[in-house]
Image (spheres, helix red, strand yellow):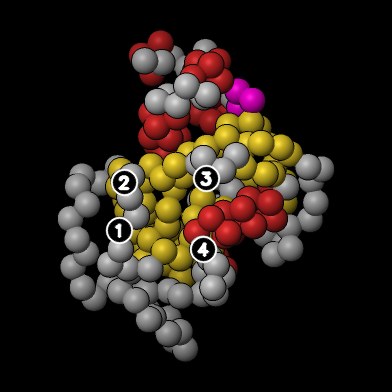
Amino acid sequence: MTDSETTIDSPIVPSVTPPDLGTALFSVDMQWGQQPVRLTAFKCREMPAEAPVTSVHVVSFCGERVLVVRDRKGSFGYPGGRLEAGETIHEAMQREVFEEACAHLHPGYELFAVLRIECTAQLPGREYPHPYSYMGMYAGLVKALEPVARDPAGIITGRDLFTFSDCERRLDEHDQLLLHEAIAVLKCNPTCIRRIRTFLNGAPLNTRS
C-alpha cells in the first residue's frame, strides 16, 4: 500500500473478535500518517458484510505490465483509496484510479482478497467508530491511460508500468503476494491469458504455472 492511505478518516481499534475468514495470506504492521495499523489479508471472492469497506485498490494490467503508482515517500503500490460519503465501491474505484493514475478500468474487475484494517493504538482526539474495517483488493484490466496529471490529494507523485522483474525489485513483499493472488484470478479470464503469460515470461520458471 502507498502513502495514500494516510487520508483514511474512520480509524478503528480492535475490541471484538473478527469472523474466521480462513488462513491469512499475510499480516503486516505499518504507519498511516501518525496512525499505526495492522493489515491482515485473506483470499476472498465476496466482500464480508459485518464491517464497513473503507477503501478499495486494484491490481490491473495495462498491456502486459502492471499499473502502479509512486507516493511522496518514493514507495510503489497499487492505485486506489478510500470511499467518500455516499460512494459505492465501484464509484470510488473509478474515481481513485483516475485521480491517482489517470487511468480508466475495464468494468469487469474482480474481488480477489480483502485486507482487514485494525488500528493498533488509539490516538488522542481521534474517534474510532468501528472495531475494524475492510480494504477490497480487485484484479482487472486498464482500458485507457490519459496524460499524467497532479493528484488532487498531493500524495501520489507518479505512475509506472512494471514488468515482473520490476515488481520483484520495487514492490513490498506483501504487494508481491497480492499480485500473485490477482494473477491466479486473471488467469481464469480468457481475455487476460495472453498478457498474463507475457508478463510471466520474466518470472522464475517455478512461478509461471
SS category of the residue bearing label 2:
loop
Q: Which residue is tagged 2?
A: 44
Q: Which residue in the rendered view is the most extreme toward the bottom?
A: 125
Q: Which residue is tagged 4?
A: 88
Nearer to us: label 4 or label 1: 4
Q: In this view, does 197 lie above or below 109?
A: above
Do we see residue 127 in this rendering?
Answer: yes
Callout 4, which amino acid? Thr
Q: In this view, does 41 lie to the left or right of 93?
A: left
Disc assigned to residue 58: 3
Do we see residue 67 in this rendering?
Answer: no
Query: Marks 1 and 2, how far apart in space?
Result: 8 Å
Along the polypeptide, which appears first: circle 3 or circle 4? Answer: 3
Disc assigned to residue 48: 1
Query: Marks 3 and 2, how far apart in space?
Result: 14 Å
Pick whichever, 98 or 188, lies toward us: 188
Along the polypeptide, which appears first: circle 4 or circle 2? Answer: 2
Q: What stretch is highlighted in magenta?
A: 63-67
Callout 3, which amino acid? Val
